Image (spheres, rainbow, N blue to C red):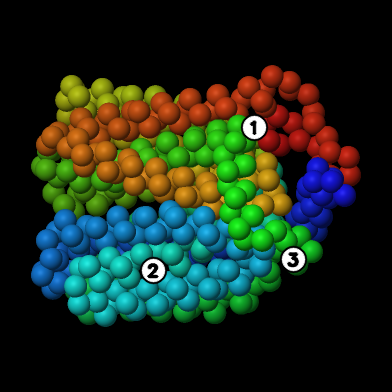
């Protein structure tokens, strides 16, 4: 059987699983827990960073590197977990990742220096990224097309609770038990999630696993990067993530230092952005079945690029003060709901038989772009919101331009495309 026939056969098998399987609330709850590891691993200990700096006798800059080290490990680690899960299954791969997460969290709790903390944060990230990347692949194992986009939107909405309440919960833990207790709490969360993982079935049966060697599977990343549509989806999400991390890195200084917003009010402004993300994800889950994930992704990138340009304009001129900087930033952040789930779904739908590898590649690009976006804000910092606004504007425009890689393929011919015996898709991704 040639490679084209094999791919078609695998897609048909995948459709059979999706059509016949109705995941229970327990499966969806566990998937949501797994997706939340990216946020909870950092947001929970943000309030403890000044105390950690004092306790470890380290500069604030060195303690801030615990976030950078985590992002690097999180970005690169996904590239390893994707092929492993395609070959050996999702559940066992996630389980190994959770064990690494528990070990890394315990190492952080026992660290006696900032450098040791950074090292253990990398270990923690290598474990956490398996949960995040492979939970997306598990959604694609169970659903396809717009239904996958709907479920991702719903799960991301639930996941958004973590950054909303994480700093508040972390602050309470620090107040009552000290900063090391936060990492012991993460140990407990990791163990509890590991136990919950084994209450759900494996989503990738042995018959549908990729039997290539890991070396060959890793080499497939090069092939994926030559696919125009994969680059379009990854670019739309990657540029947007760069802008989001520029927002995360830049707004504390823009709001608190430049506009003299009290720290407690900053938390409120940041929380409003999270609520915007949750609302847009819920809207996407309702609209994507009608318009398709490509069209919804286009809408999201248009909103993001327009609002990003407004951010740069108001950041440069100072027109309208804090209010007119916050409003376009809120709109930009809220477009997350139309971009993230749909870009991931579009990429996964192109190579369903390698969902783990594709999810890992997209995730690595997204978080790698985040490192670049936050880094550029730091490099060009001048005491004003302008560097943040400029980076966000470039990223918003880049996200929209990435859609050019998708729409020439999917919109030139609007006819229905059918794969006999499998499923019929129109160009919208429906």
Q: Position of residue 179 (x, y in %)?
A: 22, 73
Q: Secondary structure at mark 3?
A: loop
Splitting the image into 4 quarters, where does residue 122 fall? bottom left
**Residue 267 as seen in the image, left or right of residue 427:** left
Left or right, residue 130 beside residue 54: right
Q: Residue at x 41, y 49 (%)?
A: 367
Sooner in the amino-acid sequence: mark 1 or mark 3? 3
Seen at 25% across and 71% down, the residue is 116
Q: Which mark is residue 205?
A: 3
Residue 127 x %, y %:
45, 67
The residue to which callout 2 is attached is 123
> How far from the left and from the top, in percent, is residue 329?
31, 35
Gap between marks 3 and 2 measured at Cα: 29 Å
First-in-chain label (1 vs 2): 2
Work out which quarter of the rendered image holds the C terminus and state it: top right
Residue 206 on image: x %, y %: 75, 67
Name the mark nearer the viewer: 1 or 2: 2
Quarter of the view holding residue 40: bottom left
Instruction: Say which of 38 and 355 sits in front.
Output: 355
Crowding at label 3, few (<14), some or many (≥20) Cα neighbours within 10 Å?
Answer: some
């Amino acid at each position: 059987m040639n490679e084209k026939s094999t791919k078609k056969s695998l897609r048909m098998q995948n459709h059979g699983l999706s059509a016949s399987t109705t995941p229970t609330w327990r499966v969806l709850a566990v998937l949501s827990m797994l997706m939340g590891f990216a946020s909870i691993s950092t947001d929970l200990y943000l309030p403890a960073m000044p105390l950690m700096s004092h306790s470890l006798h380290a500069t604030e800059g060195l303690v801030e590197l615990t976030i950078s080290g985590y992002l690097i490990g999180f970005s690169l680690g996904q590239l390893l977990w994707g092929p492993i899960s395609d070959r050996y299954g999702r559940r066992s791969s996630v389980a190994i990742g959770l064990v690494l997460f528990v070990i890394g969290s315990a190492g952080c709790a026992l660290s006696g220096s900032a450098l040791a903390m950074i090292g253990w944060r990398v270990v923690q990230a290598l474990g956490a990224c398996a949960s995040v990347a492979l939970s997306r692949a598990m959604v694609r194992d169970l659903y396809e097309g717009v239904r996958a986009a709907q479920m991702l939107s719903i799960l991301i909405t639930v996941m958004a609770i973590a950054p909303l309440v994480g700093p508040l919960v972390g602050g309470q833990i620090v107040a009552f038990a000290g900063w090391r207790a936060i990492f012991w709490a993460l140990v407990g969360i990791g163990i509890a999630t590991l136990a919950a993982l084994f209450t759900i079935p494996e989503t990738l049966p042995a018959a549908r696993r990729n039997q290539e060697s890991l070396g060959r599977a890793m080499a497939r990343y090069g092939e994926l990067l030559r696919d125009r549509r994969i680059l379009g989806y990854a670019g739309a999400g990657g540029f947007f993530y760069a802008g989001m991390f520029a927002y995360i890195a830049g707004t504390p200084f823009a709001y608190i230092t430049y506009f003299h917003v009290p720290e407690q009010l900053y938390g409120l402004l940041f929380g409003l952005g999270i609520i915007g993300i949750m609302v847009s994800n819920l809207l996407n889950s309702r609209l994507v079945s009608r318009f398709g994930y490509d069209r919804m992704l286009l809408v999201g990138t248009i909103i993001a690029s327009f609002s990003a340009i407004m951010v740069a304009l108001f950041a440069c001129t100072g027109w309208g003060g804090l209010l007119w900087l916050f409003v376009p930033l809120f709109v930009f952040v809220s477009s997350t709901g139309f971009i993230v789930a749909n870009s991931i779904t579009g990429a996964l739908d192109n190579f369903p038989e390698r969902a783990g590898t594709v999810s890992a590649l997209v995730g690595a690009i997204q978080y790698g772009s985040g490192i670049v976006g936050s880094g550029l804000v730091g490099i060009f910092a001048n005491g004003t919101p302008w560097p943040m606004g400029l980076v966000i504007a470039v990223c918003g425009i880049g996200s929209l331009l990435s859609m050019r890689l998708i729409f020439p393929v999917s919109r030139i011919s609007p006819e229905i495309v059918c794969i006999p015996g499998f499923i019929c898709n129109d160009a919208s991704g429906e």
